[in-house]
Image: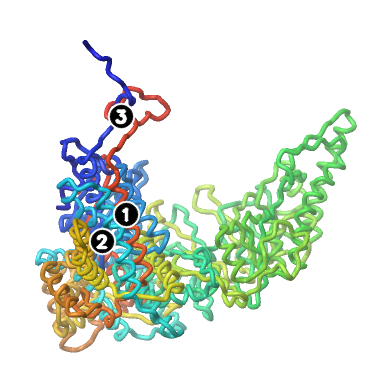
Amino acid sequence: MAQSSAQLLFDESGQPFIVMREQENQKRITGVEAVKSHILAARAVANTLRTSLGPRGLDKMLVSPDGDVTITNDGATIMEKMDVQHHVAKLMVELSKSQDHEIGDGTTGVVVLAGALLEEAEKLIDRGIHPIKIADGFDLACKKALETLDSISDKFPVENRERLVETAQTSLGSKIVNRSLRQFAEIAVDAVLSVADIESKDVNFEMIKMEGKVGGRLEDTILVKGIVIDKTMSHPQMPKELKNAKVAILTCPFEPPKPKTKHKLDITSTEDFKALRDYERETFETMIRQVKESGATLAICQWGFDDEANHLLQANDLPAVRWVGGPEIELLAIATNARIVPRFSELSKEKLGTAGLVREITFGAAKDRMLSIEQCPNNKAVTIFVRGGNKMIIDEAKRALHDALCVIRNLVRDSRIVYGGGSAELAAAIQVAKEADRIDGIEQYAFRAFADALESIPMALAENSGLAPIDALSDLKAKQIETGKSSLGIDAVFAGTNDMKEQKVIETLLSKREQISLATQVVRMILKIDDVRVPDDERMGY
Amino acid sequence: MMRPPIILLKDGTENKQGKGQIISNINACQVVADSIRTTLGPRGLDKLIVDSKGATTISNDGATILKLLDIVFPAASTMVDIARSQDAEVGDGTTSVVVLAAEILKQMKPFIEDGVHPQLLIRAIGKACEKTLKNLADLEIKINGETELREMLVKCAATTLSSKLVSQERLFFANMIVDAVNTLDAHLPLNMIGIKKVNGGNLHESRLIKGVAFQKAFSYAGFEMQPKKYSNVKVALLNIELELKAEKENAEMRLTNVSDFQAVVDAEWNILYDKLQKIHDSGANVVLSKLPIGDVATQWFADRDMFCAGRIPQDDLDRLMSACGGSVLTTVSQIDDSVLGKCGKFYEQQVGSERYNFFEDCSKAQACTLLLRGGAEQFIAETERSLHDAIMIVRRAKKNDSIVAGGGAIEMELSRLIREHSKGIEGKDQAFWMAYGQAFEIIPRQLCQNAGLDALDVLNKLRHRHAQGEKWAGIDIHREAVGDNLVACVWEPSIVKRNAITAATEAACLVLSIDQTVKNVRTPSGGAMPGLPGQ
């Protein structure tokens, strides 16, 4: 019945009539066909990501239309750069994005899980079960799985830095930086701990700045407790290193002030012209005097100043930095306890900030120089300075660090953890499967399917690590049921033990919970669609 | 002898008339109803529509789908209109009104084909409609008492939500919505419930804020130095640009003297500083403006431990005004304590990837904000539409505190009453009444079909039960059986049904009364393409 309704219709006299605008240009799929084509599309997306899961997961190389190359195994980044056209596949992209926004880690896992759920759903649809019943069953199973996760979760000692570093290592384990795992993990932990507000369990990421510079090795990456800005002193002869600097942060240019209203200065005589020149010179001098009088030994300016001003600054022995961007100004102000000064006349001693050490860092043979401001009174702003062989590595290292930062932040927010390596999923799967037998009604099938889908995460991990997936999984499952230890997972790095507690592979409960509930939500949404209208001219790959 | 042909209409004008026209109109309405009938009920499925720009909408809401379908057939657009009017009037039941109207038309079609004059049909179903409404009024159940009322509202909201994407969490959201509506004043203005969507997170993390929340506005350097937490807040609401700028757009100054130059610059600064000082003096510690607040002002406020945010959307400002009192100022010359809004708590918090500003414990508390969380963008968008429906229902139900049982129960009962009544009518009208009564059965039938139940079987059971006097027997989709829906708490406000019946009947009458369509040639836009064929 539904199939025919988007086609041309004919009335009694044989004339076609058009009900919807441009209906002949629309594609329409309805009923089970629609659900199946959606499942296919979503699974195709999930399959692309499947191989980048886990510590032995491989990277994807993505080339953008204008030739930019990105190499990554971060699920959210891959999805974003793939430029997916299909409307349902877009939902999967959104899925990994929202995991990224909320948690920042586990973006690959969530997509793989959603794909697995859909795969199971397809089988059930083939058996003739109503999609909504499947979705209802999944929802119930999801609740059960979340309960299981809660019950197997461990309390995590957030005060213990060593343990935090271990957790960060899990997140970084699958990334490009795993060569210097420990170092990166420490950087991430220290960065978060220095900006975290433990009391309100809030971490403001805007206080953590990441800078990258090509050259050097990944191992040269450092955490600067202070700010690094990609600028140099305005004049080459200015000192390269300042100790106990008093910093004046200015948002006004070193030039005679201009009214914002449109204006015109009529000069009619030579005297006037001279007066104008004198005025300009005078303002420069007053400005520098004002800065000097306030006691500042370093001026950081949001705007530029011309060579004349530059010369005057140098002559007056006042080091200055020009063209510093807004966000950096703000971070600087916070770090040095300075007040941002919009006018020279408002400069005073109280508004200056202090920094223990300001120096220019030079890199290798290139003339690249950056300014680092360290030993600031307020450690709430930090910079992670990433080095690496090429731009792609640096970008990927930044993404990896971001993931690790998110993990630590989540721990600060909620200190409960579960163990990784697919152990948590497996434990949940076992519980869900057990529960399935107790349910009457068709939801039972959905429950079992949900349990199977959960097992796909350890399965993919085993596959990516070069293990025989089915052997490894069945072995593990037997062990978990036998010993009742929920921390048994896939030994992906061949450390010799399956106990993730010993291997110290830790994930946050928050992230796991989010993965499972988000994936279930999206699956429900996809299952619930039975009618699609798409403009035909967009050649979408069904 | 050749008579010159009389050309009455422009060439290409479509002109259809007669019985064929009515039939083809009815068919068109049927097509429209077909496209949304599968969304009805708790087992109804969603539609995914991609428009020509590539924007994707996934929806279960009849009015939303019909709007996106972009229907051009003249008679069929009445269907869209009734869905919209239902949406505007009661906010829910948009699918059922269209399905019902199409079914009435379908029942009338054989009569038209048999040559019955449409006016006779119109008169008969008009009368039948009146009778139905009277029956409905007799059937509906009044709810009294404070706690019963609240319970009733929650149940009505839950029934609405049961067919939506969020059906698993319907009780959670139903309670939330009832709380939200209860914070409003007597007029229940809809725009005082703000809905904010943040991607990510679990549906359960959605929350109701008794107060106002909005996303952190774009901020200039210095913002991070401002405090982000106050208690006993005084809020200054402004419609002023706090930026260093020219006072008049096209003013031009001619300066003849260098010393004037400095004076002009100082004057400009002083204008801004005066404003800032006045705001500070009034005792406000949070400054919000609809227009931008520039970097100078941001830093000035940061210096004095005040919080400011510019470019706040108008509706957020309005909500804040009704929650906290105070008024939106367009000048600061009169600013004092009396025009400031007051609220107990202000803080900034991370929600998903966004930072949000929250105002709580407001002095007047007549506004609230629903903060929705969920997986994908489309998911939250659909959640918002669902909640909108539920909010509308609760608002209507609060004013009209009578309910009926849903799940096809009320339709079956109305159908039975009309058919019984028809037996006492003389003449042709009897058949028309019969058919009209029959039409109501479409709702339970469609519910069954969508749920994959055997519609014939279930309808027989229902008819049987109703004939035995069980007037609230309806379909219990979750148990896939027939049961008493009043007991099962599938409740709907009777106003939804009343409006749906009236609108559907009127639409049916309208379509039946058309016997000629004259459709003008579409003038090519701008006259650029004159000879375009097939327009």
* Mark 3 chain: B
Q: Helix, strand, or loop for circle 3?
A: loop
Q: Quadrant of residue A50?
A: bottom left
* Mark 2 chain: B
| Mark 2 in CB contact with mark 1 (< 8 angstroms) | yes
Q: Please say whether residue B230 is visible from this viewpoint.
A: yes
B298 vs B67, left or right, is right
Residue drawn at x 15%, y 82% is: A440
Graded by Cα atoms within 10 Å as few (under 14), some (14 to 19) or many (20 or more), the crowding at tag 2 reads many
Q: Helix, strand, or loop for circle 2?
A: loop
- Residue bearing the label numbered 2: B39
B519 vs A460, left or right, is right
Mark 3: which amino acid?
Thr
* Picture coordinates of residue B31, whole percent (x, y): 22, 49
* Picture coordinates of residue A322, whole percent (x, y): 65, 50
Graded by Cα atoms within 10 Å as few (under 14), some (14 to 19) or many (20 or more), the crowding at tag 1 reads many
- Residue bearing the label numbered 1: B65
What's the distance in space between the residues labelled 2 and 1, CA to CA?
10 Å
> Above or below — where is A100 with respect to A287?
below
Question: Considering only order in the chain, which callout, 1 or 3, is on the residue closer to the N terminus?
Answer: 3
* Mark 1 chain: B
Residue drawn at x 76%, y 58% is: B275
The residue lying toward the viewer, choosing from A314 and A184, is: A184
In the rendered image, residues at marks 2 and 1 fall on the same chain: yes
Mark 1: which amino acid?
Ile
Residue drawn at x 23%, y 40% is: B21
What's the distance in space between the residues labelled 3 and 1, CA to CA?
30 Å
In the rendered image, residues at marks 2 and 3 fall on the same chain: yes
Mark 2: which amino acid?
Thr
- Residue bearing the label numbered 3: B13
* Picture coordinates of residue B320, whole percent (x, y): 59, 67
